[in-house]
Image (cartoon, grey):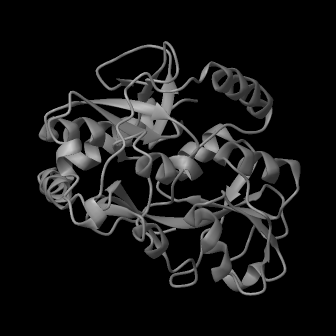
Amino acid sequence: MQPRQQRGMQTQPVCSRRIFLGSALAASASVVAGALAGCQRPSTLKVVQPTTGGGRDDLSDSVIGKDKIRIGMEAAYAPYNWQVSEASEYTIPIDNVQGAYADGYDVQIAKIVCKALGGEPVAVKQSFSGLIDSLNNGQIDLIIAGMSATPEREESVGFSDPYFIGYFGLFVKEGSPYQNATKLSDFSGATVLGQKDTMLDTVIDEIPGVVHKNPVDSVPTVFSNLLQGTCDAVTYNTENEKGYMAQNPGIVPIHFAEGEGFKQEVAANVGCRKGSDKLLKLIDKTLKGISQEERDQMWDACLDRQPA
């Protein structure tokens, strides 16, 4: 893939995004995930239904200055966000999972943003596909979950400037007939899988002649399918290529020739309820104040800490 450059608001190369367990770890990961899901409970924080005043009122004051600012995330999408059982200087509590904490790049961004807003961040764990509804139902205050501001999402969510920019790639299973591919067109006729309700799924349509497999709910399930041989390739975010490979023995990244890979970039943006203009301006100002050096240091530290 491309050599690593700057991250954040500027163009960022590397290898791609979202991580997880595979191979021999996949079975135990499923058990752990099931156990954690069983412990998940409704948020203990009061749900305040915002009034829009017919779309004319600025909703910013329902978040700015709030003691506990609820951040929606999966807590299962390292290095952006993941769940741990012990608190540290890097974590925030997960309100709806007893005794659990969230860590990751999203969490570090949430800490900086919420400090500027005058409150403390608290994670609310839920599926990625449910985040927008939870935001607009008043169950969370912000989405900081590696979510990209697509035109469809912008119809119902206000988005900040990007706090991270990355790229897409493909993994295949070791020994695959596609292992030596150098361009997207080499995957014509291949069955390719991505994660539901994310650009990891929609970007597949850039591949000419692809067999677009029905998406699955999580990145661990994506890699599990690849290792089980139910698809020929899976999409991933290249900035965490080494992490995916370390945690999923037996997968191989495709290194496309220059200009022959995916054209779309992936940006991560903070999401808030539409009509929160003052809030968005404050968030954008805060993000602009994070230097590139600080962004890189936070990202690299998350890569080092992410679960094995």
Q: Is residue 52 above or below residue 250?
A: below
The quarter of the image holding the C terminus is: top right
Residue furthest out toward the front: 53
Task: Indicate the quadrant where residue 44 lies.
Answer: top left
Horizontal side of 236 relative to 29 (left or right) equals: left
Q: 18 or 157: which is nearer to us?
A: 157
Horizontal side of 277 relative to 110 (left or right) equals: left
Residue at the (85%, 69%) spot, across then down:
177
Residue at the (16%, 50%) spot, across then down:
290
Residue furthest out toward the right: 229
Q: Is residue 148 above or below residue 119?
A: below
Do we see residue 183 in this rendering? no
Give the image location of residue 20, x and y in percent: 62, 40
Give the image location of residue 170, x and y in percent: 65, 65
Q: 126 or 112: which is nearer to us?
A: 126
Do we see residue 128 in this rendering? yes
Give the image location of residue 231, x and y in percent: 84, 61
Q: 258 or 168: which is nearer to us?
A: 168
Give the image location of residue 56, x and y in percent: 22, 66
Q: 142 or 27: which is nearer to us?
A: 142
Residue at the (75%, 82%) spot, across then down:
186
Q: How many marks?
A: 0
